[in-house]
Amino acid sequence: MSSSQSEIRVYVGNWSDNQTGGIFQYHMDPVTGALTFVAKSQEAGSPFYFTLDPSGRCLYAANTVPSFEDLPGGTVCAFSVDKGTGALTFLNEQSAHGVLPCYVSLDSQNRHVLVGSYSSGTVAILPIREDGSLGPATDHVQHTGSSVHERQTAPYVHCILPDPTGRFALSADLGIDKIMVYRLDVEPGRLIPHDPPSASLHPGAGPRHFTFHPNLRIGYVINELDSTITGYSYDAASGILTTIETVPTIPPSFTDTNYCADILVHPNGRYLYGTNRGHNSIVMFDIDPATFCLTLREHVSSEGDFPWNLAIDPTATFVLAANTRSNRVVVFRIDPAIGQLTFTGQDAEVPGALCIKTVRAGG
C-alpha cells in the first residue's frame, strides 16, 4: 500500500522480550490523531531508542539485548525505510561498544551514528555506509566518575547528540552529573574530549536527555533524579555551556518517587514539554522569548503509567506520549495559541512502549 504525502507515520519501540519486542509502525490521522497499526519489525530485538535520518531513508535503533547474562552489551541496528509504505527492512547491526545502549543520533552530515550506553557509561561513533548500513565503530570513549545519589556510583550515559554546528557532540551522563563535550571529527569518525571537557550540574541532578531550542543558542537538560530542568546558553564557537536556571518539574505537594525522562521544545520555540514518571504527567512550560527562562503553565495527566518518551508530529499539531508500564501510546492535541495539551481520546496498545518517532510519508 503506497502512502500520500499527507500521511503521518509513527514508529514505536519497546523494551521487552523477543516475543513482544520490536518496532511498531502506525499511520496517524492528521486531523483526529487516530493511530492505525500497520506492521511490526522484530529484528531490532529490544529497541530502547531509535532515530530516522532526515531524508527518511534509514532508521537506526539502539538494541539493548535484554538477556544480558547470555549476550552482554548491545548493538546498533540499521534499517532501510520503504519510501512508499514506510516498511522497515533490516540491513545489519554493529556493536555499540557498551552495555545497554539507550540513545542514538546522527551527525549533521548524516555520515555517522552516535550511540550512548547507559550501564557501561560509554559513547561510540559508527560510520554509515552508502547503502545505509553501519560499519564497525571507529571510536569509543569510557566515562569515569560518580556523584552523590545512590544511583550515581558510576557513569551512566543517557544521551549523546551533535550540536547545531556539527562541530561538537554533547553527552548527558546521569551518573556523574555532567554534560560531556566532545569535538566531533567526522572524517576519521572520532570523539575528541573538548577543553573544557564538560559542564557540571548540581550534585544529585542525574541529567538524562538534552535538547536544543530552535534558535540553536539555548539548550535544556531534564534531570531524572531530582525532577528538574536546567537551561543553558550555548556558545557554538567555543562549545561552552553556561547555566541559566534550574526549575522543578513536579509540584511541591508531590512527595512520592518521581523520575524524569524526556524533554522536547515545540518547533515554534515558545513551549517546552517533559515527562514525569511517578507523578505520571507531562509538564509544560512557557519559554520567555528574551531570557529563555521557563514558566510553569500546567501538568497534564499522561493518561497512563510511567510516561517515557515524547514526540511531536511533523505538523506540530499533536504530542504523543509512551506510557511504558501501562503499555499505551497516547495522543494529545496542542493548542496552537498557548501550547496546552488536551487528550484526544486516541491511543494505541504497545507492550512496554518507550521510544516514539514521527515522520511525514516520503521523508
Image (tube, rainbow, N blue to C red):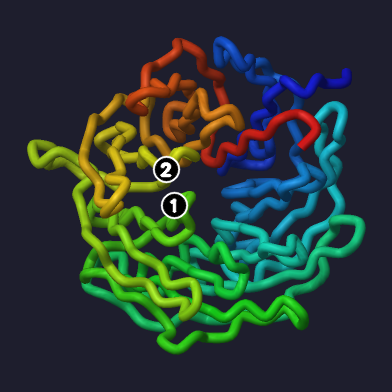
Badge 2, how many Cα within 10 Å: few under 14, some, many 20+? some
Percent x, y of residue 182: 53, 79
Q: What label sits on residue 269 in the rendered view?
A: 2
In the figure, 161 relative to 184: above or below?
above
Task: State whether residue 64 appears in this view.
Answer: yes
Percent x, y of residue 264: 44, 44
Percent x, y of residue 343: 40, 16
Question: Looking at the figure, which quarter contains the N terminus?
Answer: top right
Amino acid at dot 2: Gly
Q: Nearer the viewer, residue 246 or 254?
A: 246
Q: CA distance from mark 1 to mark 2?
A: 6 Å
Q: Are marks 1 and 2 in contact (CB under 8 Å)?
A: yes
Tell me the residue at 53%/81% (across/down): 142
Badge 1, how many Cα within 10 Å: few under 14, some, many 20+? many
Task: Identify residue for label 1.
Answer: 213
Is disc 2 placed on a helix, strand or loop? loop
Tell me the residue at 38%/25% (across/down): 304
